[in-house]
Image (cartoon, rainbow, N blue to C red):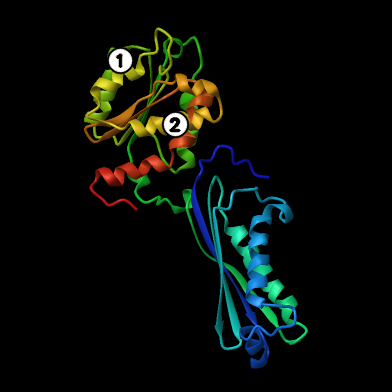
Amino acid sequence: MVNITHKSSTLREAIATAKLTVSKQATIDAIQNKSVPKGDVFEFSRAAGLLAIKKTSDVIPDCHPLPVEFASIKHSIDGLSILITVEVHTIYKTGVEVEAMHGAAITALTMYDMLKPLDNGVEIAAVKLESKKGGKSGISKEGREDLRIAVIVCSDSIAAGNNADASGKTILQKLEQHQLQVAAFDIIPDDVASIQAKAKQYSSEGYHLILFTGGTGLSPRDVTPDAVAPMLDRSIPGIMEAARNYGQQRTPYAMFSRGVAGFIQQTLVLTLPGSPKGAAETMDALFPYVLHLFKVAAGMRHD
């Protein structure tokens, strides 16, 4: 199966439909009168569809097992056709569109099985996904190309040329995955004055986003949060709370990160861990969701 361990759990919804058509009005009458010999067609097929939704990962190899938080199956009659509408919700790392389509298909097949003794002209057609919400697919990419971004590596050893940068490169790769380009990249020592100078420079130059990596831990030279925090005009604690929660699900050491986030004037500043793994996990926890802040800061309504 595809690796989804880097994803965050969010509310995800999907609606799928299937269309079943009979060949005569007598079949529709039997369904409505509940006189089909095998039983109540709508109730039996609904039960089968609900089971199919929950068992999707058992029969489709690449589907992940996931918690089904809500499922609804409705039937509507239009002439000789019956439209089956299936809606599924989950709070998880991947969507439920296949679950919704599987539910629609099995609901239709169950109806076919129950009706075939009465009507040899029953047909199933157009099993399709009508809509889906949640996850990254629901986040607009509009305006990303206009964001000016700076990445700053804070490390005494890397600045002195004794070690090679890895976390900064990791952040660049993660940004590229979200169609974000970096306009400035610097390596500076773990020094309060140097960190504050870079934050002041890029915020005054109108950069939209500054990402510091390194210096968020508890060693004597880890001073990035201490340098950045006093400069923030508006602190946003929830950003790093989300990052730490994400990291804590992967390693108990995430609780030691002291990263901070907020705005300096109109510039969003994020402080990330200095390890490549920590930086990558923080980027996965925050992006692309954190980009919504630029719409909010501009006075636009929340989605």
Marks 1 and 2 sit apart, C-alpha to C-alpha, by 25 Å
Residue 183 visible at all: no
**Residue placed under numbered mark 2 in the picture:** 243
Other residues around mark 2 within 10 Å, as few (<14) / some (14–19) / many (≥20)? many
x, y (%) of residue 302? 31, 50
Helix, strand or loop for disc 1: helix
Helix, strand or loop for disc 2: helix
x, y (%) of residue 173? 50, 34
Residue found at the very far top of the displayed protein: 220
Q: On the rendered structure, is 89 left or right of 238?
A: right
Q: On the rendered structure, is 258 left or right of 205?
A: right
**Which is nearer the eye, 261 or 65?**
65
Q: Which mark is residue 82?
A: none
Compared with 62, 193 (above or below) is above
**Residue placed under numbered mark 1 in the picture:** 194
Quadrant of the frame with the N terminus: top right
**Which is nearer the eye, 280 or 78?**
78
Residue 265 visible at all: yes
* Image quadrant in which you'd find residue 30: bottom right
Q: On the rendered structure, is 134 left or right of 294?
A: right
Q: Residue at x 46, y 42 (%)?
A: 178
Q: Amino acid at mark 1?
A: Ser
**Which is nearer the eye, 173 or 267?**
267
